[in-house]
Image: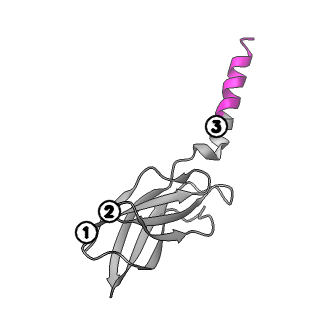
Amino acid sequence: MHFMKPALITLLCALSAASPALAEAPRIEGATAHQNGSSWTISVTLSHADTGWEHYADGWRVLDENGRELGLRVLAHPHVNEQPFTRSLSGIAIPEGTRHISLQARCIVDGWSDESFRLTLP
């Protein structure tokens, strides 16, 4: 029985390393906001350990100070060899007087990240 312990430990380690659910949540590395008349363009730099179509960061959203969604940027494909990467969303209506927004990333397996990125508007 003692000889099975190393084999079992090796197997468990291999299974946990291969499990996509154990990958880190998508992370917003940085963001910028630019006003274009009455609307805004938000650019987000995102990183995630995309493994392919079965596990990748598939979007990010813009939230107001009350947690209301103002915009959603859907990411239509994995970015396995492009990390971190930056994508933008234009035409976002941000209420007058708003000083801060929050950004939250999502992955296809784990859903919305618990972390949010707070961005001060210029």
Residue 46 sits above or below residue 12 on the image: below
Task: Locate the N terminus and report the quarter of the image it occupies.
Answer: top right
Name the residue type under label 2: Glu
Helix, strand or loop at label 2? It is loop
C-alpha span from label 3 to label 1: 42 Å
Locate residue 29, reporting x and y percent. Answer: 40, 60
Task: Locate the C terminus and report the quarter of the image it occupies.
Answer: bottom left
Q: Bin the neighbour count of mark 2 within 10 Å (Cα to Cα): few under 14, some 14-19, many 20 and up.
A: few
Name which of mark 3 and mark 2 comes first in the sequence: 3
- Main SS of residues in magenta: helix
Name which of mark 3 and mark 1 comes first in the sequence: 3
C-alpha span from label 2 to label 1: 8 Å
Is 3 situated left or right of 91 in this image? right
The residue at which mark 1 appears reads as: 99
Q: Quadrant of residue 6?
A: top right
C-alpha span from label 3 to label 2: 38 Å
Give the label, 3 or 1, closer to the camera: 1
Q: Residue at x 35, y 65 (%)?
A: 64
Magenta residue span: 1-13
Is residue 2 highlighted in magenta?
yes
The residue at which mark 3 appears reads as: 16
Q: Bin the neighbour count of mark 3 within 10 Å (Cα to Cα): few under 14, some 14-19, many 20 and up.
A: few
What label sits on residue 65 in the rendered view? 2
Locate residue 38, reporting x and y percent. Answer: 33, 85
